[in-house]
Structure formats: C-alpha cells, structure tokens
Image (cartoon, rainbow, N blue to C red):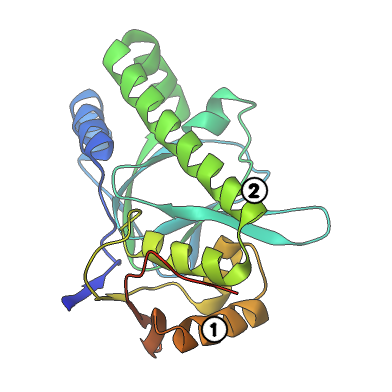
C-alpha cells in the first residue's frame, strides 16, 4: 500500500511549474512576498471586481459558484502553479466564481493594471496562460461528461481518485488525507452530502473505497467495477 499523502501542499503540474517560473521572472517585486490565507477563508467572491490575479504557491483552493436558486457547485481543486482570476479579468473584469482556501495557503497577488501591462508585452506569459486555459478546459469537459453519463457512486469514485492526484487509476492501494469535507466532495461530485454518504457506503461494500478516518480515505484500484 502506498504511504498516505496529504493534499495540503497542493499538486503542481509541469505547466504550473513553467508558469511559476515566468511569473517570478516577470513580476519580481510582487513575487517577493506571499499573502497567507487561513483555512476556509476567501480570496475573492463571485460578482466582485477583479482587482488582482493570484498565483497559488501553497495549499488547496477551490472555485465555487452559486446559481440563482442558491445551489452551489465546485470546479475542482486549484493546484500549486495555477493563476486565478486572469480569465475573469479579460472577460468582463468581474469574478464569475468565488475562491476559497480549504487549508492554510499562500498566494502571490499581482495588481490587474500591472498584470495587463506585462501581458501586452510578453509572448511567453501569454503562451503559458493559453496552456493553463487548455488544461482547464479539458478538465471541465471531462467533469461535465462525468456528470452527464455516470451515476453518483462512479462519479464519487473517480472524483476521489482526482483528489488523490491520480486522474489515471493506479495499480496500488493508496491512502490520502484531504482537507475537503463531505459537503465539499458533494459539491465536486455534483450531488448532495446525503447522496455522497450513500455512495460511500456502496463503494465500501464493493471494497474499492472507504474513509478510514475523518479526513482520510483509502482507494483500491479496480478497473472492472459493476456499480449497479
């Protein structure tokens, strides 16, 4: 069994690494200091003006959006190296979603005017942002596909693997510690906490996933599962 892993430090992608390097080089003054966020605090709120873009340096963040009826959905965890808010800046200058820090986290903040000035002059920054946007689009398309075609237990199982940092299911049993609570996982899966509880019971009966402690779950790989 793979040793338990914590998501509190975030998961950095190769594109994220490259973007961090570019941001640090192009914005040395802003990169010299980070802003700390406590668990369950907000970086920005849905409907507010974009006054800065934020680079994730440490921690776990989620984007969440509330519709007209008060229903909330999350759009996955934002990894270390993700740049938050720049797409809203370029498309209306208003945040379409809220951003919440799930655990103790650090960000670099770049004022919008400064960011736009450098963006107009740097082809490298533009390329890195296009790469991040493409990766996010692919992730959201996969998420919508899962919501449309899979039942709750299977969506939950695949979401837990994504939280574990393994979009492709591994061949070993792993344990993962996560700062996400059951209501957060429900929002990621696109269902209610009650449905998540029922789904977890079904996954446990199938012996493919179980919560071992309050914030720790165990995943057992099985690529031929009958979720019925």
- Picture quadrant where residue 71 is located: bottom right
Q: Residues within 10 Å of mark 1 (few under 14, many from 20)?
A: some
Q: Earlier in the sequence, mark 1 or mark 2?
A: 2
Residue at 53% over, 78% down: 182
- Residue 75 location in percent, x, y? 54, 52
Q: Nearer the viewer, residue 7 or 170?
A: 170
| Extreme residue toward the right, this view | 69
Q: Is residue 68 left or right of residue 183?
A: right
Residue 67 shows in this picture: yes
- Residue 189 location in percent, x, y? 57, 63
- Residue 214 location in percent, x, y? 40, 88
- Residue 174 location in percent, x, y? 25, 74
Q: Residues within 10 Å of mark 2 (few under 14, many from 20)?
A: some
199 over 27 or under it: above or below: below
The residue labelled by disc 2 is: 46
Residue at 57% over, 79% down: 199
Residue 85 shows in this picture: no
Query: Which quadrant does the N terminus fall into?
Result: bottom left
Query: Which quadrant does the C terminus fall into?
Result: bottom right
**Marks 1/2: CA–CA distance:** 35 Å
43 over 70 or under it: above or below: above
The residue labelled by disc 1 is: 202
- Picture quadrant where residue 3 is located: bottom left
Q: Nearer the viewer, residue 72 or 51?
A: 72
Callouts 1 and 2 close, C-beta under 8 Å: no
Query: What secondary structure is found at the residue carrying circle 1?
Result: helix
Query: What secondary structure is found at the residue carrying circle 2?
Result: loop
Residue at 61% over, 25% down: 91
Please identify, in this view, whether the residue under mark 1 or under mark 2 is nearer the observer: 1
141 over 128 or under it: above or below: below
């Amino acid at each position: 069994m793979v040793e338990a892993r914590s998501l509190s430090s975030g998961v950095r992608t190769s594109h994220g690494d490259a973007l961090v390097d570019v941001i640090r080089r192009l914005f040395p003054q802003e990169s010299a200091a980070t802003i700390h966020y406590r668990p369950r605090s907000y970086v920005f709120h849905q409907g507010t003006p974009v006054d800065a873009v934020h680079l994730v340096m440490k921690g776990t963040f989620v984007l969440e959006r509330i519709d007209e009826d008060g229903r909330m959905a999350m759009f996955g965890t934002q990894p270390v190296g993700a740049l938050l808010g720049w797409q809203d800046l370029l498309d209306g200058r208003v945040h379409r979603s809220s951003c919440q820090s799930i655990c103790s986290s650090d960000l670099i903040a770049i004022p919008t005017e400064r960011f736009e000035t450098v963006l107009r002059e740097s082809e490298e920054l533009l390329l890195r942002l296009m790469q991040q946007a493409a990766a996010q689009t692919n992730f959201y398309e996969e998420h919508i596909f899962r919501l449309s075609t899979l039942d709750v237990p299977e969506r939950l199982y695949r979401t837990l693997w994504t939280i574990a940092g393994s979009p492709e299911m591994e061949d070993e049993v792993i344990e993962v510690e996560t700062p996400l609570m059951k209501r957060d996982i429900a929002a990621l899966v696109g269902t209610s906490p009650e449905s998540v509880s029922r789904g977890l019971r079904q996954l446990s009966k199938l012996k493919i996933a179980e919560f071992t402690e309050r914030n720790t779950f165990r995943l057992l790989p099985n690529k031929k599962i009958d979720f019925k």
